[in-house]
Amino acid sequence: MVTISPSHSNSSPPPVSIGHRIDRWDPEDEAAWEAGGKNIARRNLLGSILAEHIGFSVWSVWSVMVLFMPTAVYHIDAAGKFFLVAVPTLVGAVLRLPYTFATATFGGRNWTIISALALAVPMTLTLYFISRPETSYTTFMIVAAFAGLGGGNFASSMTNINAFYPQRLKGWALGLNAGGGNIGVPAIQLIGLLVIATWGNRSPQIVCAVYLVLIGIAAVIAALYMDNLTNQKTDARSLLDVLKFRDSWIISFLYIGTFGSFIGFSFAFGQILQLNFLAGLANGAPATPAMQATAALHAAQIAFIGPLLGSLSRPLGGRLADKIGGGRITLYSFVAMMAAAGVLVVAGTVDDANAEAANTAIMTAYVVGFILLFVISGIGNGSVYKMIPAVFAAKAAALHPHDAPTAAVWSRTMSGALIGIAGAVGALGGVAINLVLRASYLGVDKSATTAFWVFAAFYIICAVITWTMYLRRPTVSTPTPADALTPIH
């Protein structure tokens, strides 16, 4: 993973960027931070947010494309579309592990440019094939897989920003970086809405063309305003070392519940809405192209709201975790997500019992339930990621009580490694959500109700684990330093 070698000095000279290269960087040196370090960090944060924002948009492009793919034209049913959307989620999750090392290997600025330009590949492929309805389903899956490149950007971006900010500001900085990136999901959905509202549901290539331009802009801004830290070191062994701690497994599991929910619902929400709107318009009769276009428009008008609010709430989760504690905010988030999932369970059960299409009250309950899940999962995303540096700062102090510099390096290395691992595992939760929804729609009721029950049960498990491992008072008097579980209330 990424190690930042501290280099304190009595005079604390301000860090200097020469040719977008910084040789001395220690964010914990408060004098150097105030002398100019914070301005450099802010500049790199803004460039990182933009590139990650575009990455999330590309990653979620197929959540928009499926709204432009009427079943009668593309011959892909609802179950097939859920699986199609799951493919880039899976690829993005896997890519997050190698992307974790990229900024230390190539430099934060250099890798941001490379990874941004690489996004032109999936957008170009999507632009070409989405205009050809006769394309095979297998080809669409391959094209969708390339969109996973956008998902990998999150890990490299978060690892890079983790290196730029001091411990006391990591919750805010990581939350802002991730939240700004997450907004890429509703941004592309909003552009999809504008295209559908203006040109109908048969012009998806316009969305792709817009993002090809934005990709170029993100790469240029990274080249002009970002920096490479030369004292970042690649330590691949840290990925294995961090897995020796049970906290790593627990936090990764909890991130499935928060980020997995956010990204999974972001990809699926529009399609769920479209299916319900189409059922209401058709009312049992075969759906016409006009009905499909209207359903796509109605779905697009709502679908972006959830991811937008979830993205905006993520920095709030980090800020609350800084003040109140990551463990407490995470527990409160899972309890609230249980309640929101309960709203969906009730709405789905009532809907299944009614032979007719969902009425206004049921549709309102669906929308409210999902919006709550988005907002709360966003808060949980910020609080879970704040737990990572907090846990390893406590462990570092226990392992190296008389060697603060060594403890700081070890803590940052382990935190950076877990940021990559948790990001990858959490994204796999998004895959699971789409697969569970697919299975639910293939069930007897042909609805998402069974999936809602599964989600509610999972949030209960996450809440119990959070309380047990991070909030309940320890029962042992003196835990060993290497495996100490320090409560982070």
Image (tube, rainbow, N blue to C red):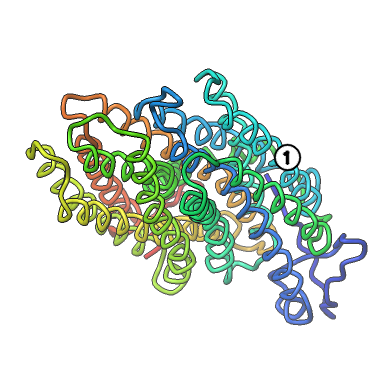
Q: Residue at x 74, y 48 (%)?
A: 103
Q: Quadrant of residue 173?
A: bottom right
Picture coordinates of residue 118 (x, y %)? Answer: 73, 40
Q: Quadrant of residue 23?
A: bottom right
Left/right placement of residue 352 relative to residue 458 reads left
Q: Is residue 368 left or right of residue 53?
A: left
Q: Quadrant of the N terminus?
A: top right
Residue most toward the right? 19
Query: What type is the residue that disc 1 sits on?
Result: Ala
Reply above or below: 327 against 261: below
Instruction: Residue 373: give x, y in percent of width and height.
Output: 32, 55
Name the image quarter holding residue 161: bottom right
* Residue 277 appears in the figure: yes
Residue 13, how many percent across, how many down?
85, 77
Question: At x 41% / y 44%, what residue is drawn?
Answer: 260
**Most foreground residue, 366 or 160:** 366
Residue 136 lies, in percent from the top left, at: 53, 18
Q: Nearer the viewer, residue 228 or 224?
A: 224
Front position in the image: 478 or 202: 202
Kindly state the secondary structure of the residue where label 1 is placed: helix
Name the residue rendered at 79%, 43% in the picture.
Answer: 105
Q: Is residue 182 visible?
A: no
Label 1 environment density (alpha carbons within 10 Å; few <14, some 14–19, many ≥20)? some
- Residue nearest the viewer, comparing 353 with 129: 129
Quadrant where the C terminus lies? bottom left
Q: How many marks?
A: 1
Q: Which residue is mark 1?
A: 118
Q: Is residue 477 above or below residue 120?
A: below
Q: In the displayed structure, does residue 309 sit left or right of residue 53?
A: left
